[in-house]
Amino acid sequence: MKACFMGLGYIGLPTAIIAAKHGVEITGVDINPKVVEMTNQGKLHIIEPGMEEMLQEVVRTGKLHASVTPEVCDAYFMVVPTPFKGDHEPDVSYVEAATRAVIPLLKEGDLYVIESTSPVGTTDKMAALIFTERPELNGKIFIAYCPERVLPGNVIYELVHNDRVIGGIDEDSTKKAQEFYSQFVQGTLHPTNCKTAEMCKLTENSSRDSQIAFANELSMICDKAGINVWELISLANKHPRVNILNPGCGVGGHCIAVDPYFISAEFPAESKMISTAREVNNYKAFWCAEKVQNAMLKFELKHKHKPVVAMMGLAFKPNIDDLRESPAKYITTKVMQSCNNADILVVEPNIVSHKVFKLTDYKEAYENADIVVFLTAHDQFKTLEWRDDKEIMDFCGIFKK
Ligand code: SAJ
């Protein structure tokens, strides 16, 4: 079987590699020639543990090759970004462009799958587009939606072992897509229709966003009330039916901080809680930045000189190098913009250098700063000892018991 993966990003490339390892002949397509070149050389352009060795193997055995244009295959997978536009409305133009690129290649019996996170109704829209351009294929090809669920950093395991939801435009499409994924997925492949599968992906990430918003809201209440939020959550979680997540400096990444808008943009009247959770998590980052700015002013008033401030972590979550939609990056930028020449040391141990931020070693920054702001709970930071001679602002629970 030959399959074409449209988009060789954080999800498309690993999925293509794993399918190739299981015997599918893959054409990986990306509009970025650099990505295509690197992939064909067996070099991974993303960071994912263990993945480069696998890529080298499938390139060597000829099971995977990359190209800037799609080729005739038996199955086509749309794994391109779906960002949002100005007012948080989903932008499906990449899905549409990738679909238009494969339409001329489709033939009877082919499978077309969207994996990209998409607003409800996208699969039906793309099916309509395909059948408008190629009416003779109506009822003759299989079309389905199958969202990914992997956690960056653990992709090799999760791609194979996570359960997946698969929703076709009809039952035959669902079955055909299940057959494809069963070649490399060991988790259960749950059948449904395409609208439910689209909504399921948005629901999973909105659920997590809402739960984190609850923790973030608690953290701001506790700050005002003089209560240690970490101790409070750990005690509340001793209840058999309570399981509160961790507060942080906000919610980042390209999924949880984005996907809930795909629901609220289309169902604004019905999605009050989902929208409010987004607002709470965005506000938490703003609140943290204000806290740091106030602490800096207080320090200056007391000591008659500006503080040295260490901003610990830029990544959107612990132990990764990904800065997309990162609240830590937002807070650091906001503090730097308002710092009036105070000395701000920026720390991100998972990145060697950055084009905007001059990075400082984490131990050196901790040693030299008057105010230390923990934004991302990287493992390295947890090795540091609490210091009474510094003002420590621990937004991510580095020193929680
Ligand atoms: N966060 C907290 N407190 C917590 C947990 C997370 O503040 O208790 C923050 C993180 O620091 C980060 C953000 O939330 O800023 C998101 O991190 P995450 O680890 O919860 O999720 P992602 O964005 O890396 O991956 C999510 C996953 N979805 C769910 O867990 C429901 C993953 O399974 C999806 O595949 C992925 O989104 C995606 O691609 O949609």
Image (spheres, rainbow, N blue to C red):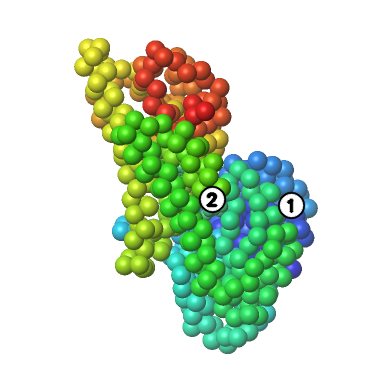
Determine if residue 22 is in view.
Answer: yes
Which quarter of the rendering shows the N terminus? bottom right
Q: Which residue lies at the image location 57% right of the left edge and 62% below the top edge?
A: 147
Q: Which residue lies at the image location 52% right of the left edge and 65% below the top edge?
A: 200
**How busy is the neighbourhood of tag 1: few (under 14 within 10 Å), some, or many (20 plus)?**
many
Q: Position of residue 394 (x, y in %)?
A: 42, 28
Q: Is 163 placed left or right of 93 in the picture? A: right
Q: Position of residue 18 (x, y in %)?
A: 70, 54
The residue identified by callout 1 is 58
The amino acid sitting under disc 1 is: Val
Image mark for residue 241: 2
Image mark for residue 380: none
Closer to the camera in the image, 206 or 159: 206
Q: Which residue lies at the image location 56% right of the left edge and 29% below the top edge?
A: 379
Spatial separation of the CA atoms under disc 2 and disc 1: 46 Å
The kind of secondary structure element at disc 2 is loop
Q: Which residue lies at the image location 36% right of the left edge and 63% below the top edge?
A: 271
The kind of secondary structure element at disc 1 is helix
Determine if residue 126 is in view.
Answer: no
Q: Is residue 61 above or below residue 385?
A: below
